[in-house]
Image (cartoon, rainbow, N blue to C red):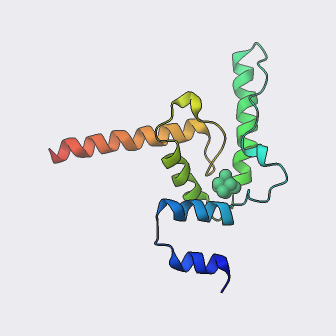
Amino acid sequence: MTLIQLRRAQAPANTLSDLRFAVITRGACRNAPDPDAWFPDEPAPTGDPALDLIERAVHEEHARTLCDGCPVRALCLELALHEERNLQRSEIHGVRGGKTARQRWNIRRGRRQAAVRQARKAA
Ligand code: SF4
């Protein structure tokens, strides 16, 4: 049994360390020649806000396509949502789990709102 197989066998399912281990050992980006591709620099402002948005979308779309087919995409997204849960919007960068920073922010906001609605229903 390899060390990885042993670690998998010993780890309880769905813990945070499981998520980290899965992403680190099985993520498609782990041996990428350009790890910065998932965290591209912000494009230099052109002076045209519409063009800036398009530039950013192109960079993000490239990074998102790199996540397509990653075997741990869903786990990676859950890990990112957990690790970023206490950050401000401006502190969240890059593409993780196939989602941009803005998409992850919106997912978290949606989950928070759903939790509040459920709590109100239960009260
Ligand atoms: S989903 Fe994307 S960022 Fe996450 S491990 Fe896979 S390739 Fe890397």
- Give the percent coordinates (x, y) of residue 121: 19, 45
Residue extending furthest top? 47
Relative depth, front residue between 102 and 15 = 15
Relative depth, front residue between 8 and 37 = 8
- Give the percent coordinates (x, y) of residue 60: 70, 39
- Give the percent coordinates (x, y) of residue 97: 61, 52
Residue extending furthest bottom? 1
Relative depth, front residue between 82 and 70 = 82
Instruction: Please indicate whether residue 40 sits to the left or right of residue 10 in the image.
Output: right
| Residue 103 position (above or below residue 51) | below
Q: Quadrant of the N terminus?
A: bottom right
Badge count = 0
Q: Quadrant of the C terminus?
A: top left
Q: Quadrant of residue 92?
A: top right
Instruction: Please indicate whether residue 66 sits to the left or right of residue 99 in the image.
Output: right
Name the residue located 70 percent from the left edge and 34 percent from the top edge. Answer: 57
Name the residue located 51 percent from the left edge and 78 percent from the top edge. Answer: 10
Residue extending furthest right? 33
- Give the percent coordinates (x, y) of residue 34: 83, 49
Q: Quadrant of residue 73?
A: bottom right
| Residue 61 position (above or below residue 20) | above
Name the residue located 55 percent from the left edge and 39 percent from the top edge. Answer: 103
Name the residue located 55 percent from the left edge and 48 percent from the top edge. Answer: 80
Instruction: Please indicate whether residue 47 sits to the left or right of residue 113 in the image.
Output: right
Quadrant containing ligand 1: bottom right
